[in-house]
Amino acid sequence: MARPRIEWAVSTTGKERSNSLGYARSNREIEKALREVADLDSAAPVAVHYCYPKNDRIFRPRAGKRNVLFTMYENAILDEPLRRAFEGVDLILTPSRWCAENFRRYTDVPVEVVPLGVDARAFPFRKRSLGPGVRYRWLYLGAPNSRKFTILPQLFSGLLSRMPEVCELYVKTQSSRVTSSEILSLAPPGAIERDGEVLRFANVTIDNRYLSRSDLLDVYHSAHGFLFLHCGEGFGLTGLEAMATGLAPVLAYHSGVLEYATPENCLPVGVTSTEIDTEHDEGIRRETLPWPNLDDAVAQVSVAMTEPKRLAEMGRRASRDARRFSWQRTARGVCDALRRRAIL
């Protein structure tokens, strides 16, 4: 079979520090894997756009070519830029069945599921243990906004802050907005210590540095538990990475994470519809979103800290399950979808 010719049309630079960071990181991995199975050529008759098409600078269909949009979205109700982008493409690729079902409600353009991956060599398994005097470290990794934090401030103030000798919260984020985040608002006046882009108070560390992949691995490996209490994910790459390293996440059990999360490899938290004020580029907006249940989260965090043997086995299962997803599988999936839909 002849190698397909594809224009891999992306606008991410790899230096993003906001919500585009996930696209930038995964773009590099997919492009590298695609080069093993396809010829990437700007003159190819097919252009695959891997992005969230929020404006014409990010996404612009190529004239005279078959255009494919590879994208995802965290909510069931799609924003106008995404719905408008669907009108200009011949095929839509998305990494989860949950996204695919949502997209098909808005368009007649064919939709194919191509899951994202994880590099098992870059995120290897590590057995966790708690030595004498070591606090149980809960890791949150993601954007510092209400749509991602969701109930994290309440979980901290209602439970984790009351056990400073036993556990700590490590927030790894990547946005200048962290200085006004809900987590920092919980610090007593004058209690925040700053070391460059790392801030600390009580049993909380907020790390706003831009980390290399090896440094990011160190952050994953330093944690004993992973908090993934989102209000929606198109796929949730950080959850898969955490699982690959042996962390069974306490996870909002809905949306795109169901592509890899099961009751056997995570501690599921239920969601209910809740009205909240959320931050957007245009300002604050009132939305009804699937919100993680705080009581569920408290119960699952307690299970994680009191049943180490169960969590150790669950972490091993999580790592095995995560390894079913690879960037090579993603690249093959792109090519197979293009052939299946006669785009190539």
Image (cartoon, rainbow, N blue to C red):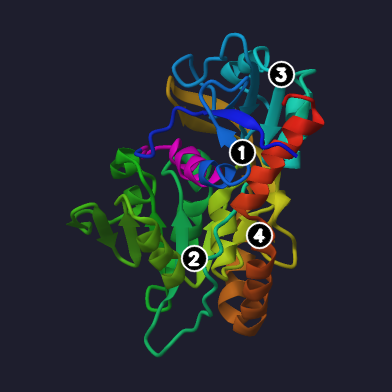
Distance from label 4 to label 2 (Cα)?
13 Å
Q: Nearer the viewer, mark 1 or mark 4?
A: 1
Does 15 appear above or below 198? above
- Label whose residue precedes the other's in the sequence (4 or 2): 2
- Is 241 displayed left or right of 144 in the figure? right
Badge 4, how many Cα within 10 Å: few under 14, some, many 20+? some
Marks 4 and 2: CB-CB under 8 Å? no
Disc 1 residue type (three-letter): Ala
* Disc 2 secondary structure class: loop
Does 334 appear above or below 252? above
* Disc 4 secondary structure class: helix
Q: Quadrant of residue 325?
A: bottom right
Residue at (67, 79) in percent of width and height = 313
Q: For this rendering, which residue is in front, 157 or 240?
A: 240
- Label whose residue precedes the other's in the sequence (1 or 4): 1
Q: Which residues are drawn in magenta?
A: 16-30
Write down the residue under mark 1: 38
Q: Is 146 within the magenta?
A: no
- Quarter of the picture containing the C terminus is top right
Checking the image for residue 296, the label placed there is: 4
Write down the residue under mark 2: 159
Badge 3, how many Cα within 10 Å: few under 14, some, many 20+? some
Residue at (63, 55) in percent of width and height = 326
- Label whose residue precedes the other's in the sequence (4 or 3): 3
Write down the residue under mark 3: 90
Marks 2 and 1: CB-CB under 8 Å? no
The answer, for residue 205, to whether it is visible in the render is yes
- Label whose residue precedes the other's in the sequence (1 or 3): 1
Disc 2 residue type (three-letter): Leu
Helix, strand or loop for the magenta stretch, by majority: helix
Distance from label 1 to label 3 (Cα)?
19 Å
The answer, for residue 76, to whether it is visible in the render is no
